[in-house]
Image (cartoon, rainbow, N blue to C red):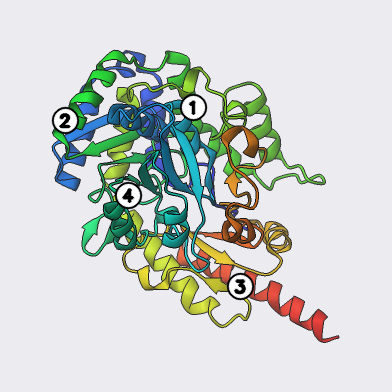
């Protein structure tokens, strides 16, 4: 039986991670408070050589608290890129600020410094660097603009934990940085986030907010622990008993979502730009810190594997005409959470691969993802970022998750080769 290759659904979780979640499932007295929280925070202190660390139940909560602590006037503008996820702009909005979307360079996912300068006004206070796919932004260019206009830099390391730029870790360049431990991030505890800063005064303001917030409720924590257990079953059965567009694994997945036992990474309210109970900042529960600590021990191994797969993809796929690669000069600096490609006939290629039990990624097939996001509600104006709007039509992501073998990577390459060989034959007829 052909093994499925799925780019999401807890792709980092090995058997020991699932077992750890299962064992902690039966210890609810350790779920909220415990020593693992401070242990995880101390590990981040050592990793980044920063004095102030705060853990949260999500990465987006960390961003929101960091922005609130900066105490910008209400309605101040924060520059961030299009070709992004709605949770970033929502965090800006929920902090009482206004997101302003900046276009990206055509051959990378970095902010276009020319468009960046055009969109700076007297109300602009900060720039968020997103380091998509674990590929470092062109930070020096942005630092020049930020210094010129007296703007603060905020680093989004949600997809870039372990990546470096000019010999320094992503997270060491801004006023503060935040990271995510979401189910498909660099390390995963289903949910979780971390904020780091060197700024003593900013840390004091963050601490005031942090001390006033609570832990998530037990039902929320239960769902986070249940997620890796359920995903193990879903991945195993994802292509079993296919009937049309359905299969046993898909039925299980949708059924658990309908029952409220499995949550989508982006909720319906978030797509509409509306706050809701689970979005408000909360502290990281101890049991999720336990899972994150276990994964953090493997981060170097994980990222070495991701780079190895990314380098293999480039070597093999550069022979195929019509593929556009991004940021190849950063193959040794990025950690390639996913391997992005600009292709011809993106959706057709995804469908072709899915028939061969390979699910490719869609980060981002909408200018502000995911599908269903209300651009009007979050303040994005169509036509304001033409490069990003064009890019979303042709983007795919190849899987690089650490559970993949090189044999799996060869299957992915073979699938793309077969697809374009077939298209070339049809075009020649």
Q: Label 4: which residue?
A: 161
Q: Label 1: few (<14), some or many (≥20) within 10 Å?
A: some
Distance of label 4 from label 2 (alpha carbons): 25 Å
Q: Which of the marked residues, 4 or 1, is nearer the chain's N terminus?
A: 4
Does residue 190 sit above or below 133 in this rendering? Answer: above
Location of residue 189 by image quarter:
top left
Distance of label 1 from label 2 (alpha carbons): 39 Å
Q: Position of residue 273 (x, y in %)?
A: 57, 29
Q: Which of the marked residues, 3 or 2, is nearer the chain's N terminus?
A: 2
Distance of label 4 from label 1 (alpha carbons): 25 Å
Which quarter shows the C terminus?
Answer: bottom right
Q: Label 3: which residue?
A: 414
Distance of label 1 from label 3 (alpha carbons): 35 Å
Which quarter shows the N terminus?
Answer: bottom right
Q: Position of residue 110 (x, y in %)?
A: 43, 59
Tell which residue pokes out farthest to the front in this image.
122
Q: Label 2: few (<14), some or many (≥20) within 10 Å?
A: few
User: Residue 201: which disc?
Assistant: 2
Q: Which of the marked residues, 3 or 4, is nearer the chain's N terminus?
A: 4
Q: Is 265 placed left or right of 215 in the picture?
A: right
Distance of label 3 from label 4 (alpha carbons): 30 Å
Q: Label 1: which residue?
A: 226
Q: Which of the marked residues, 1 or 2, is nearer the chain's N terminus?
A: 2
Q: Nearer the viewer, residue 324 or 146?
A: 146
Label 3: which secondary element: helix
Label 4: which secondary element: loop
Can you tell which of label 3 and label 2 is closer to the viewer? 2
């Amino acid at each position: 039986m052909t093994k499925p290759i799925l780019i999401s659904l807890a792709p980092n979780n090995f058997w020991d991670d699932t077992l750890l979640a299962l064992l902690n499932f039966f210890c609810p007295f350790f779920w909220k408070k415990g020593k693992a929280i401070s242990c995880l925070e101390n590990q981040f202190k050592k990793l980044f050589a920063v004095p102030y660390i705060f853990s949260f139940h999500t990465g987006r909560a960390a961003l929101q608290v960091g922005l609130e602590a900066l105490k910008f006037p209400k309605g101040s503008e924060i520059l961030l890129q299009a070709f992004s996820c709605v949770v970033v702009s929502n965090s800006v909005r929920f902090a009482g600020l206004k997101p302003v979307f900046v276009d990206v360079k055509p051959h990378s996912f970095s902010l276009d410094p020319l468009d960046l300068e055009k969109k700076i006004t007297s109300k602009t206070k900060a720039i968020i660097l997103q380091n998509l796919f674990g590929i470092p932004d062109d930070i020096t260019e942005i630092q020049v603009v930020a210094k010129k206009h007296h703007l603060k830099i905020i680093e989004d390391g949600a997809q870039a934990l372990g990546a470096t730029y000019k010999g320094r870790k992503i997270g060491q360049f801004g006023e503060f940085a935040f990271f995510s431990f979401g189910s498909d991030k660099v390390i995963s505890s289903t949910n979780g986030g971390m904020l780091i800063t060197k700024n003593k005064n900013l840390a004091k303001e963050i601490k005031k907010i942090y001390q006033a917030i609570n832990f998530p409720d037990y039902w929320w924590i239960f769902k986070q622990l249940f997620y890796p257990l359920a995903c193990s079953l879903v991945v195993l059965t994802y292509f079993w008993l296919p009937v049309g567009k359905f299969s046993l694994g898909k039925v299980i997945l949708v059924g658990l979502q309908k029952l409220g036992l499995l949550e989508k990474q982006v909720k319906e309210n978030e797509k509409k730009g509306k706050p809701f109970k689970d979005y408000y900042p909360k502290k990281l529960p101890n049991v999720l810190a336990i899972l994150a600590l276990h994964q953090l021990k493997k981060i170097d191994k994980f990222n070495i594997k991701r780079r190895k797969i990314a380098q293999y993809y480039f070597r093999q796929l550069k022979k195929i005409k019509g593929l556009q690669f991004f940021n190849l000069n950063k193959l040794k600096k990025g950690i390639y959470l996913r391997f992005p490609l600009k292709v011809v006939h993106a959706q057709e290629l995804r469908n072709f691969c899915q028939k061969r039990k390979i699910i490719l990624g869609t980060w981002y097939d909408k200018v502000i993802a995911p599908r269903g996001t209300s651009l009007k509600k979050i303040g994005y104006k169509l036509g304001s970022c033409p490069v990003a709007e064009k890019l979303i039509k042709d983007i795919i992501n190849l899987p690089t998750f650490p559970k993949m073998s090189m044999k799996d990577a060869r299957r992915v390459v073979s699938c793309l080769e077969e697809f374009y060989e077939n298209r070339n034959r049809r075009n020649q007829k």
